[in-house]
Image: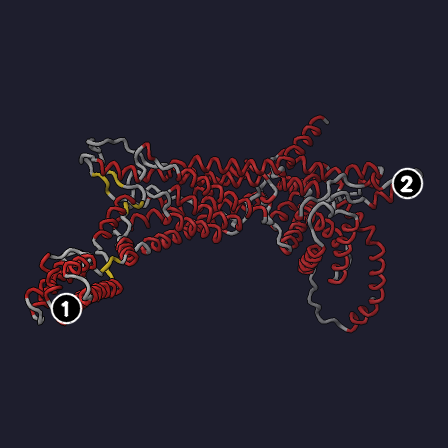
Amino acid sequence: MKKSLHHAENSALIKRWKNNAFVRVALYLILGVILYLFMVGNIAPEVVDVSIGSRPTHDIVSPVTVVDEEETQRKRDAAAKEVEAVYTKDDSITNSQTRELDNTFNDIKDILDDEESSASEKRQAIEEVISYDISEGSYDAFLSYPIEEIDTLRRVTTSIVYEVMDGGVRRQNDGLEHAYQRVRDSLVVSSLDERLRQLSYEMAEASIVPNYLIDQEETDRLREEARDQVPSDMIREGELIVSEGDFIDQEDIRKLRLVGMLSESANEYPYLGLALFITLIIALLAYYISFSDLSIQYNNATLLMYIVIVLINVIVMKVIYLFQTLDYIGIGFITPISLGTMLMTMLIHQRIAIFSSFIFGLLAAVLLNGTTSAHIDISYGIVTIFSGVAGAFFLGKATRKTKILQAGFVISVVTMVAICAVTLLQSVPADGVAFTGKLTFGFFNGILASILTIGLMPFFEAAFRILSPMKLIELSNPNQPLLRKILIEAPGTYHHSVMVANLAESATEAIGGNGLLARVGAYYHDVGKTKRPHFFIENQMNMENPHDKIAPHLSKTIITAHAKDGAQMLREHGLPKAIQDIAEQHHGTTLLKYFYHKAKQDNDSEVTEREFRYAGPKAQFKESAIVGIADCIEAAVRSLSKPSPERIENLVRQIIRDRLEDGQFNECDLTLKELDQVARAMCETLQGIFHSRIEYPEDKDKATQKTKHKDQDQGQERADKQKQNKNADKTSTHHSA
């Protein structure tokens, strides 16, 4: 009693652990932390211990591609300085200067026309009008020449100033000197005498000013264009910074600091990037699982098994990464990533395996980056995805080890094709030896994955009590001790179990369930009968029924005990829990009608149905419920005297209806639609078993006799129908249906 109570407490604790949301979150967090610890070494920046004047013992190359901002800025400044300033001629200056010169001459003319002023007063007034200095003789010239000559001087001088300035006068590059020379050249051919030429030159020289000004906006635009045309100076990944044995100078130190290879400048961003990378992977995984309809959605034990498979793959990748430092070109392609997807396909589901192929591809891109200085090698990621998906697709529902080996060969072929693809996409000539080495490693990828899968399967099956297809095939072997025990000690029960297995498998597969589990569970569901085989009618050959001599309550105890006894025997022999559950649940809490009614007839006191029901529990999953239905139907159909298709279908649907109304499916997720599919599948199987035979020609007497007995057959059908409940109950009693 204490042992049973302890077992029940442990079962309840395990059930709570399997469905606990906090445990689920903790498992995801643990996976994330472990992944980070495994991958952090792959992204840790390389640091060198050097100083100015030291000599490195090996070539130092850049681990990353970065922009050398300082060198880029220097080159862009130099390019901008080479762009000359843009000048624009300002005609308003030309007009202003000529207008001012003309006004000066007009003022001088007005002074000269003033007859009331003396010569000295006129000279003084002229000095005040002219705002720039000219020679003393030039002032006197205004007083020495008639007004007509002064007008000529004005026209010549104003014309020369306008002509010279209209041609443009620059301040730079001797622009003014060139303008003055043009004035002198123009005066040579003028009609002025020597003295007036000197005066004209002096006034023109004073009036000519630069009218070509810098267009700052256009100049800045052109210089900015020159800057933009200078590409960024890059220190590229793999670029040699310092050769082995060379002295390190200040420029080398600057570059090493820029690429983060000095201890004080080590880049911390990769650590944050890795944390975000893993967070995205875990979030994507959790989201996918939470919206799937697989057992991993709510079963923490399955999730734990999934995490273990992922970590095994990660460990294998980490080991291969260590070998990459030995310069085996392409050794990363030997990593048996499909080991994880094949295990997931066989132990969990194909869909989760295909999805995980992409997760493994992301992890491999980081964990197998030993052949590049970058933190991610996308070529390994691509090859990993293809090999993983190939393993999941081709393996399918494998039931034999040879299928796993065949899947390994397919993975090898797919991996080699993927290697060819990523190599050719690199647009560089492929080295023959290196390429051959990659393909060789790729070939052994699938072979190694299949071998490891076969080797690890038993450990997962034992540790997580998983029923893989191969394990089920193994358990269905007639040489299994318990099956041999049933065959030898209860041959009728063995034949009955085989028939139930056929019905249960076809019905389970019709609704998309695990048909192989239903078949194997049916083989073992009545193993408890081997304790008292002769109390069950299928094993009573040429002997009287012992139940006729004992009380109904004792018969009920003996009959109902076989479910618990069978589960206990299966536990003792270490069979998987699902098989134990089918044996314990296939009767649910159904009523032993025959002994219940017999007890009511034999006893004057009140007899309740509860006393004559199985202890349960009711079916907890589809396969268990279907085995129970098949168990009852097989025995009931065998009791029919003339099983026609119509009678079989009526009986099948009646039994399912009775169980449904009795609440036997309340604790499993069978739907009404699935129950209809189960009924149709079982009817098809039974019709194949009880098929009609060919009727050979009969003579007239036999034909007459057949007509004569037709009414008798119809009467027999009515009698069969009346006895159906009684027969069904007896078969329930003696066949455990």
Residue furthest left in the image: 194
Q: Nearer the viewer, residue 93 or 703?
A: 93
Q: Residue 403, how many percent across, how many down?
A: 47, 50
x%, y% of residue 703? 78, 71
Q: Is residue 720 above or below residue 287?
A: below
Dot 1 or dot 2: first in sequence order is: 1
Q: Secondary structure at mark 1?
A: helix
Name the one closer to the observer, 101 or 536: 101
- In the figure, residue 471 lies in which quadrant? top right
Q: Disc 2 on helix, strand or loop?
A: helix
Q: Residue at x 49, y 38 (%)?
A: 32
- Nearer to us: label 1 or label 2: 1
- Which residue is drawn at the image coordinates 82% and 36% (left, top)? 554
Q: Quadrant of residue 90?
A: bottom left
Report the number of numbered marks. 2
**Mark carried by residue 150:** 1
Question: Does residue 415 appear left or right of residue 561 in this picture?
Answer: left
What label sits on residue 602 in the rendered view? 2
Q: Is residue 175 visible?
A: no
In the orientation shown, which residue stands out farthest toward the right? Answer: 604
